Amino acid sequence: MKNIKILFIIIVSLATIWLFDTLHGCSLISFRESNISFHDLPKEMQDTILYWKENQGSYFPNIDSLIQNGDGMPLVISFDKKYSLENEKFGPWVKSRILTRVSDGKTFKFPRDTPVPFIVRNDTLVIPTDYNILLSWNSTSKWHLHKLR
């Protein structure tokens, strides 16, 4: 009987956490709007991406240790500083990524395995379709484009 009570408490606790997380107010973003090529990005975004690619060696001399530590590459590039990106964690694990519009506090939730960096300009979000885009540059890479409303 004691084991059943403990199991019941665990199930109710997990259900409560799931319900709170679901009703928290973040909407999970899906990328149905468009996929574009690098050359279709605004010039300012192209220049920023190329800058990181061309200058990573001068700013990050020991790139192997930076990759292992998870440092060195930006998670979000916000041209007007209106957005911030944080990891939502469950214990030591990253559960999802939360992009927050600083002006009104509106949040956008992304799966934890969404490639970075998030590039935001004029409330338009651009995310690479491939991982480590700043380390392994390829001009034929595709990008997801999403208007943040």
Image: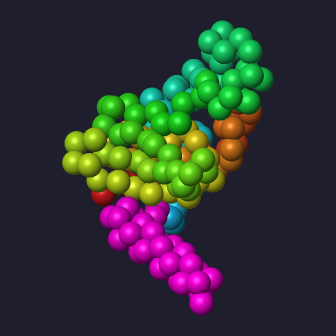
Asked whether 15 falls inside the magenta stretch, the response is yes
Task: Name, please, the residue furthest toward the left.
Answer: 104
Query: Left or right: 148 with respect to 61?
Result: left
Query: Magenta residues: mostly which secondary structure?
Result: helix
Q: Residue at x 51, y 73 (%)?
A: 14
**Is residue 6 or residue 133 the one in the foreground?**
6
Q: Which quarter of the figure is the C terminus placed in?
A: bottom left
Task: Name, please, the residue furthest toward the front.
Answer: 2
Which color scheme is applied?
rainbow
Residue 106 in the image, given as x and y percentages of width and height: 29, 53
Tell me the quarter of the picture where residue 4 sits.
Answer: bottom right
Q: Residue at x 61, y 24 (%)?
A: 72
**Is residue 135 or residue 25 the one in the foreground?**
25
Whether residue 33 appears in this view of the structure is no
Residue 6 in the image, given as x and y percentages of width and height: 56, 79
Q: Which quarter of the figure is the N terminus placed in?
A: bottom right
**Is residue 120 or residue 92 the one in the foreground?**
92
Tell me the quarter of the picture where residue 147 sits.
Answer: bottom left
Which stretch appears magenta? 1-29
Q: Residue at x 50, y 42 (%)?
A: 118
Residue 68 in the image, given as x and y percentages of width and height: 73, 30
Query: Left or right: 11 with respect to 137?
Result: left
User: Vertically, is 35 above or below 24?
Assistant: above
Residue 100 in the image, given as x and y percentages of width and height: 35, 47
